[in-house]
Image (cartoon, helix red, strand yellow):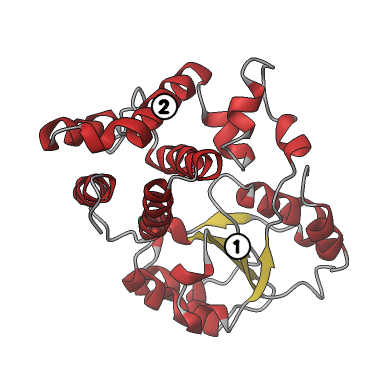
Amino acid sequence: MIGQKNLIEKINQYTIDTFPRSVIIIGEKGMGKHTLVDYIKSQIVQLPLIDMTGNISDEYIDEIYRNPNPAIYMIDLSEMTEKSQNVLLKFVEEPLNNSFIIILAENKNVVLNTIINRCISFEMEAYSRAELATFLTSEEDKDLILDVLRSPGKIRSTNINNMRELFELCDKVVNKLAAANYSNMLTIANKINFKDDYSKFDIDIFFDTLSFCLLNSYVEEHNNTALKMYNFTRDARKKLLDKRLNKELFFENYLTKLWLIAKGGN
């Protein structure tokens, strides 16, 4: 597995008898959390893998306890609400004999402390630029992509032509948002994928690209407004991890506040 040498060495020290019963793997979107689970399954635990992410309920968990079979139970918290996490807590507190629970999360801040405290944490390592370059399928606009995208999953899912258009859009936001009127500013939301329209821009990659452009503007031009916009964008991006969020409404509110900052407001 590319880019996770220290973590793999740590995992390789375990056997099926010593591997923790409850584990949480922390890593941003596209970092390779599912690939790491596959590695654990094939190299360490060697048990069937059951993805129970979409089936978290008291009834399903009770059924597992009634018919216990040795397995790895994987749960991706990026697909779960806090209510579902509370249901999951029972399962984590009382793990089955000869079975393992592996939880995936993008950030510890979105995980209930009661779950974290009952798990051993494995944190994905940041990828170097050279490691990320190995996931590119073309040398075309290599630097453009590597300047912004910091995970293999995002690189693999990005269309280079789409990325160029996204850079152009973000450059306009940095340099022309202050001059835009309110209705024109809101049209940016029409370019973001909220409902599986993959011809539009991924919202996570939009925030990554805009953050890069804003920070670059501040560093190169000492643009204090760009720094305020960057800090606001960075904080707003963290809220995307909340699965209760109406992303479309959130994004329109975000654009409104960003527009006000660009015009000299707070």
The three-letter amino acid code for the residue at tag 1 is Ile
Instruction: Tell me what residue is drawn at x 16 percent, y 30 percent.
Output: 184
Q: Which mark is residue 166?
A: 2
Q: Is residue 23 above or below residue 128?
A: below
- The quadrant of the rendering that contains the N terminus is top right
Q: Nearer the viewer, mark 1 or mark 2?
A: 2
State the image quarter where residue 169 is shown: top left
| Mark 1 nearby-residue class (10 Å; few <14, some 14–19, many ≥20) | some
Q: Is residue 13 left or right of residue 85?
A: right
- Residue 119, percent from left and from top: 62, 77
Q: Which mark is residue 7?
A: none
Instruction: Tell me what residue is drawn at x 35 percent, y 61 percent.
Output: 242
In the image, 187 versus 232, the foreground residue is: 232
Residue 189 visible in rendering:
no
State the image quarter where residue 121 is shown: bottom right
Task: Tell me the residue that label 1 is attached to.
Answer: 26
- Element assignment for label 1: strand
Q: Is residue 225 left or right of residue 185?
A: right
Q: Is residue 222 above or below residue 135?
A: below
- Which one is earlier in the sequence, the residue at label 1 or at label 2? 1
* Distance of label 1 from label 2 (alpha carbons): 28 Å
